Amino acid sequence: MSEITSTNACLVIIDMVNGFIHEGPMADASIKNIIVNIEELIKSFHQNHQPIIAFLDKHPENAKEFTAFVPHCVANTSESEWVEELLPYQNDVLFFEKNSVNGFLAPDFQQWFEIAPLYQQYVITGCVSDICVLQFALTLQAYIHQHNLDATVTVCEDAIATFDAPFHPKDTYHTMAIAFMKQCGIHITTSKEITL
């Protein structure tokens, strides 16, 4: 794995909310193991004056997504709130709420993306590997390809995770997500390989 160095990078943190880690039907406490790596990346990006954005899964009670997934992260519940471990950094982060698995489609993000500069490096972290992380990373990569942009999508393998369930063995789905992203030219590395 090669070291990533960029003076023009954006850190993306996906769905580090209570509903995927601490409580609720889709929570998996093992996901909290990636928090320390995300925390170090936040410190590094902040220290180097690089932007940090984060998505919060936040649904209305009648969300269409609940026809595919069990109801989770309903707005105005603790499930939809950023995890306590990362709250000390919330003032350094620009938040976007999303009502689908793909944060790229969130209206507020699209408005921001339209006016934000193109970053040489988009460093993606968060959960869950095979759903929200995968879809955002693939969509961003497809956008870059469509417009022939000089930018790289990077995913930190030690700063993403997924949940475990009888129908969803986390190691298998995590490995599949990494393989799909690699296949599309997304750079897979570790948090320690990111230097700014």
Image: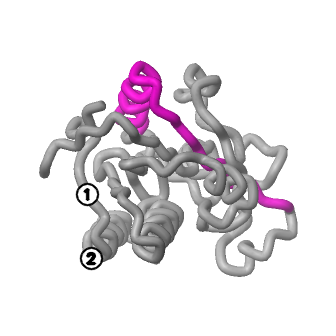
Residue at 78%, 76% (x, y): give it.
Answer: 64
Horizontal side of residue 152 vs 104, given as left or right: left
* Above or below 54: residue 177: below
Counting every numbered tag in the picture gives 2
Q: Which of the pair 14/28 is nearer the observer?
A: 14
Horizontal side of residue 81 vs 123, given as left or right: right
**Image location (x, y in percent) of residue 66:** 74, 73
Sort mark 2 into few (<14), some (14-19) or many (20+) by Cα contacts within 10 Å.
few
Residue at 61%, 67% (x, y): give it.
Answer: 101
Amino acid carrying label 1: it is: Ile
Residue segment shown in magenta: 35-60
Residue at 62%, 27% (x, y): give it.
Answer: 90
* Above or below 182: residue 152: above
Residue at 56%, 24% (x, y): give it.
Answer: 89
Is residue 47 highlighted in magenta?
yes
Amino acid carrying label 2: it is: Gln
Secondary element type, mark 1? strand
Disc 2, disc 1: CB below 8 Å?
A: no
**Image location (x, y in percent) of residue 164:** 43, 62
What is the quadrant of residue 82 in the picture? top right
Residue 24 appears anywhere in the view: no
Horizontal side of residue 194 vs 145, given as left or right: left
Is residue 52 highlighted in magenta?
yes
Sort mark 1 into few (<14), some (14-19) or many (20+) by Cα contacts within 10 Å.
many
C-alpha separation, residue under disc 2 versus residue under disc 1: 11 Å
Kindly identify which residue carries mark 1. 188
Residue 121 appears anywhere in the view: yes
Kindly identify which residue carries mark 2. 183
Most distant residue in the left direction: 1
**Image location (x, y in percent) of residue 113:** 62, 54
**Image location (x, y in percent) of residue 42:** 44, 30
